[in-house]
Image (cartoon, rainbow, N blue to C red):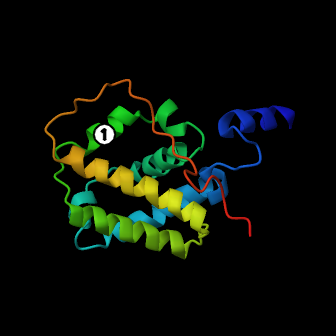
Amino acid sequence: MIAKLILDMENNNDHLTPSLFEWAGGMPVFEKLFDKFYDKVLADELLEPVFKHMPAQHRLHVAHFVAEVLGGPKLYSESEGSHFEMIQKHVARHLTQQHRKRWMELLLETADELQLPDDPEFRSAFIAYLEWGTRIAVLNSNLDNVTEDADMPMPKWGWGVPGGPYKG
Protein backbone atom coordinates (compact mmCIF):
# COMPACT_ATOMS: atom_id res chain seq x y z
CA MET A 1 0.00 0.00 0.00
CA ILE A 2 2.78 2.45 0.88
CA ALA A 3 4.58 1.68 -2.39
CA LYS A 4 1.36 2.44 -4.30
CA LEU A 5 0.89 5.69 -2.38
CA ILE A 6 4.45 6.77 -3.17
CA LEU A 7 3.96 5.86 -6.83
CA ASP A 8 0.68 7.81 -6.89
CA MET A 9 2.43 10.82 -5.37
CA GLU A 10 5.23 10.63 -7.95
CA ASN A 11 2.78 10.27 -10.81
CA ASN A 12 0.34 12.94 -9.66
CA ASN A 13 2.49 15.25 -7.53
CA ASP A 14 -0.47 15.10 -5.16
CA HIS A 15 -1.84 11.80 -3.96
CA LEU A 16 -5.19 13.41 -3.27
CA THR A 17 -5.77 14.36 -6.91
CA PRO A 18 -6.43 11.38 -9.17
CA SER A 19 -5.13 11.36 -12.71
CA LEU A 20 -7.66 11.86 -15.49
CA PHE A 21 -7.18 8.16 -16.24
CA GLU A 22 -8.08 7.20 -12.68
CA TRP A 23 -11.01 9.62 -12.49
CA ALA A 24 -12.44 8.15 -15.71
CA GLY A 25 -12.39 4.63 -14.24
CA GLY A 26 -9.17 3.03 -15.42
CA MET A 27 -8.21 0.87 -18.37
CA PRO A 28 -11.46 -1.13 -18.69
CA VAL A 29 -13.29 2.16 -19.29
CA PHE A 30 -10.86 3.29 -22.00
CA GLU A 31 -10.90 -0.09 -23.73
CA LYS A 32 -14.70 -0.18 -23.72
CA LEU A 33 -14.91 3.46 -24.83
CA PHE A 34 -12.76 2.93 -27.91
CA ASP A 35 -14.30 -0.44 -28.74
CA LYS A 36 -17.84 0.99 -28.77
CA PHE A 37 -16.61 4.18 -30.45
CA TYR A 38 -14.98 2.34 -33.36
CA ASP A 39 -18.20 0.35 -33.86
CA LYS A 40 -19.82 3.73 -34.53
CA VAL A 41 -16.94 4.88 -36.74
CA LEU A 42 -17.31 1.82 -38.96
CA ALA A 43 -21.04 2.48 -39.29
CA ASP A 44 -20.52 6.16 -40.13
CA GLU A 45 -20.79 7.30 -43.75
CA LEU A 46 -18.02 9.88 -43.44
CA LEU A 47 -15.53 7.99 -41.26
CA GLU A 48 -15.97 4.39 -42.43
CA PRO A 49 -13.89 4.87 -45.60
CA VAL A 50 -11.01 6.27 -43.53
CA PHE A 51 -11.01 3.44 -40.97
CA LYS A 52 -12.35 0.39 -42.82
CA HIS A 53 -8.87 -1.08 -43.29
CA MET A 54 -7.66 -0.53 -39.74
CA PRO A 55 -6.10 -3.60 -38.12
CA ALA A 56 -8.06 -5.36 -35.37
CA GLN A 57 -5.61 -4.06 -32.73
CA HIS A 58 -6.26 -0.41 -33.65
CA ARG A 59 -9.04 0.03 -31.08
CA LEU A 60 -6.87 -1.30 -28.28
CA HIS A 61 -3.82 0.73 -29.35
CA VAL A 62 -5.81 3.96 -29.37
CA ALA A 63 -7.34 3.12 -25.97
CA HIS A 64 -3.88 2.47 -24.54
CA PHE A 65 -2.42 5.60 -26.13
CA VAL A 66 -5.13 7.93 -24.82
CA ALA A 67 -5.13 6.24 -21.41
CA GLU A 68 -1.35 6.70 -21.12
CA VAL A 69 -1.53 10.36 -22.12
CA LEU A 70 -4.19 10.91 -19.43
CA GLY A 71 -2.04 9.37 -16.71
CA GLY A 72 -2.54 5.64 -17.18
CA PRO A 73 0.05 2.87 -17.43
CA LYS A 74 2.64 2.97 -20.19
CA LEU A 75 1.15 0.07 -22.14
CA TYR A 76 1.34 1.91 -25.43
CA SER A 77 4.84 3.36 -25.19
CA GLU A 78 6.41 0.27 -23.62
CA SER A 79 5.01 -2.35 -25.99
CA GLU A 80 2.88 -0.92 -28.80
CA GLY A 81 4.62 2.15 -30.19
CA SER A 82 5.75 5.67 -29.50
CA HIS A 83 4.38 9.15 -29.96
CA PHE A 84 6.51 9.46 -33.10
CA GLU A 85 5.00 6.24 -34.47
CA MET A 86 1.50 7.50 -33.69
CA ILE A 87 2.25 10.65 -35.66
CA GLN A 88 3.57 8.55 -38.56
CA LYS A 89 0.30 6.60 -38.72
CA HIS A 90 -1.50 9.82 -39.69
CA VAL A 91 0.94 11.09 -42.34
CA ALA A 92 -0.52 11.40 -45.86
CA ARG A 93 -4.01 10.26 -44.78
CA HIS A 94 -5.46 13.65 -45.79
CA LEU A 95 -7.92 14.03 -42.95
CA THR A 96 -10.20 17.05 -43.01
CA GLN A 97 -11.80 19.19 -40.33
CA GLN A 98 -15.05 17.45 -41.24
CA HIS A 99 -13.46 14.06 -40.39
CA ARG A 100 -12.04 15.46 -37.16
CA LYS A 101 -15.31 17.00 -36.02
CA ARG A 102 -17.27 13.82 -36.73
CA TRP A 103 -14.61 11.73 -34.90
CA MET A 104 -14.96 14.03 -31.89
CA GLU A 105 -18.75 13.98 -32.03
CA LEU A 106 -18.91 10.18 -32.05
CA LEU A 107 -16.32 9.80 -29.30
CA LEU A 108 -18.07 12.25 -26.99
CA GLU A 109 -21.43 10.64 -27.75
CA THR A 110 -19.92 7.28 -26.76
CA ALA A 111 -18.40 8.78 -23.60
CA ASP A 112 -21.87 10.01 -22.62
CA GLU A 113 -23.48 6.65 -23.37
CA LEU A 114 -20.88 4.86 -21.23
CA GLN A 115 -21.36 7.48 -18.51
CA LEU A 116 -17.77 8.63 -18.30
CA PRO A 117 -17.49 11.36 -15.68
CA ASP A 118 -19.36 14.45 -16.81
CA ASP A 119 -18.16 16.89 -14.19
CA PRO A 120 -16.98 20.13 -15.81
CA GLU A 121 -13.36 19.68 -14.76
CA PHE A 122 -12.95 16.18 -16.21
CA ARG A 123 -14.82 16.95 -19.40
CA SER A 124 -12.88 20.18 -19.88
CA ALA A 125 -9.52 18.39 -19.62
CA PHE A 126 -10.68 15.33 -21.60
CA ILE A 127 -12.11 17.40 -24.45
CA ALA A 128 -9.09 19.72 -24.43
CA TYR A 129 -6.76 16.77 -25.01
CA LEU A 130 -8.99 15.30 -27.73
CA GLU A 131 -9.25 18.68 -29.47
CA TRP A 132 -5.47 19.15 -29.31
CA GLY A 133 -4.72 15.61 -30.45
CA THR A 134 -7.23 15.52 -33.30
CA ARG A 135 -6.08 18.89 -34.61
CA ILE A 136 -2.48 17.66 -34.63
CA ALA A 137 -3.63 14.49 -36.41
CA VAL A 138 -5.26 16.57 -39.16
CA LEU A 139 -2.10 18.68 -39.56
CA ASN A 140 0.14 15.60 -39.72
CA SER A 141 -2.24 13.81 -42.08
CA ASN A 142 -1.63 16.49 -44.66
CA LEU A 143 2.16 16.12 -44.56
CA ASP A 144 4.20 13.80 -46.75
CA ASN A 145 6.69 12.92 -44.00
CA VAL A 146 7.37 13.47 -40.32
CA THR A 147 9.93 16.08 -39.33
CA GLU A 148 9.60 15.47 -35.58
CA ASP A 149 12.32 13.88 -33.47
CA ALA A 150 11.85 10.09 -33.34
CA ASP A 151 12.58 10.19 -29.58
CA MET A 152 9.89 12.74 -28.78
CA PRO A 153 8.19 11.95 -25.47
CA MET A 154 4.59 10.86 -25.09
CA PRO A 155 2.29 13.78 -24.31
CA LYS A 156 1.11 13.99 -20.71
CA TRP A 157 -2.24 15.63 -20.08
CA GLY A 158 -3.54 16.64 -16.68
CA TRP A 159 -6.32 18.61 -15.12
CA GLY A 160 -5.09 21.94 -16.41
CA VAL A 161 -6.52 25.18 -15.08
CA PRO A 162 -9.33 23.59 -13.03
CA GLY A 163 -6.63 21.73 -11.09
CA GLY A 164 -8.68 18.68 -10.26
CA PRO A 165 -12.10 17.13 -10.25
CA TYR A 166 -15.26 18.81 -9.04
CA LYS A 167 -16.12 17.34 -5.66
CA GLY A 168 -19.34 19.19 -4.95
Q: Which image quadrant: the C terminus? A: bottom right
Name the residue: 31% across, 25% down: 149
Between 26 and 97, the residue placed more toward the observer is 97
In what element is the residue under mark 1? helix
Count residues near mark 1 (Cα–Cα under 10 Å), then give few for <14, some for 14-19, many for 20+.
Answer: some
Residue type indicated by callout 1: Ile
Query: How far across and how far down the image is residue 138, in percent?
Result: 24, 52
At 59% across and 62% down in the image, what residue appears? 121
Is residue 97 or residue 87 the one in the foreground? 97
Residue 32, quarter of the rendered image = bottom right
Q: Please provide percent x and percent y for residue 31.
A: 53, 56
Does residue 144 appear left or right of residue 138 in this picture?
left
- The residue under the point 37% across, 65% down is 104
**In the rendered view, does 84 fall on the left or right side of 59?**
left
Q: Tell me the quarter of the image containing the N terminus.
A: top right
Where residue 120 appears, x then y in whole percent?
58, 68
Residue carrying label 1? 87
Find the residue positioned furthest to the left.
144
Question: From this viewpoint, which residue is outermost toward the right?
Answer: 1
Q: Depth check: 163 or 47 in front?
A: 163
